Image (spheres, rainbow, N blue to C red):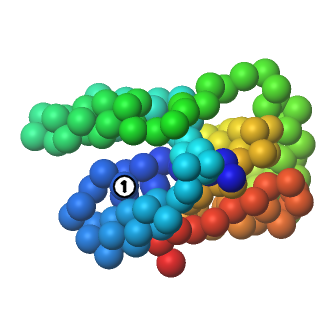
Amino acid sequence: MKYLLDSDMVNILYDDTRKAHHDALHRRISKLTDEDVLQSSALVLCELEYSFYNAPDKKKASIRKTIVSVTNDFDAILPINQDIAPIFGELKALFKRARNLTRKDMRSHNVDLMLASTAIQTSSILIGTDSIYQTLANLNQRLFHENWIL
């Protein structure tokens, strides 16, 4: 199986101060087989870089360490490519109608929608805690979502 971890999962993975969630995530990852592929996305790296540049100086070293770890620890960092565009467009329109949101409201969901589109395009299971993912999975039967910290 291929698994795509979102930003929250990546942050939990490297933050042992969130003990219960951190431990649960590590237990789940330890059960993966050699055939399983643990992936993240260039979008997650973008969000981490944004966090780095907006963090107080005392937190920057920790965030930079997470960024380096992600690039070294995952089997793959998935790029954003044009193949997700039609998936993204359809998924965003379905989500907008399902939640009756304005165009302005939709902006805050773009990264989550792009991650979900990437998961669909790569036939990966999207791992995250955001409630939007279950809603999107209900709207598109090709999206599979799991929360590994429950």
Q: Quadrant of residue 98?
A: bottom right
- Front-most of 83 and 91? 83
Q: Residue sitting at 26 percent across and 71 percent down?
A: 19
* Mark 1: amino acid: Leu
Q: Residue sitting at 32 percent across and 75 percent down?
A: 20
| 39 in relation to 144, above or below | above
- Local crowd size for mark 1, using a 10 Å CA cut-off: few (<14), some (14–19), many (≥20): many
| 99 in relation to 69, above or below | below
Callout 1: SS: helix
- Front-most of 87 and 122? 122
Where is residue 96? Give x, y as percent. Answer: 81, 53
Q: Which residue is mark 1?
A: 13
Count of all numbered marks drawn on residues in the image: 1
| 60 in relation to 100, above or below | above
Where is residue 26? Give x, y as percent. Answer: 38, 63
Where is residue 110? Give x, y as percent. Answer: 66, 41
Q: Is residue 107 visible?
A: no
Q: Residue furthest front?
A: 34
Q: Residue furthest left?
A: 58
Q: Residue furthest top?
A: 82
Q: Is residue 83 visible?
A: yes
Q: Residue sitting at 55 percent across and 33 percent down?
A: 76
Where is residue 141? Give x, y as percent. Answer: 89, 60
- Front-most of 115 and 1? 1
Q: Quadrant of residue 111?
A: top right
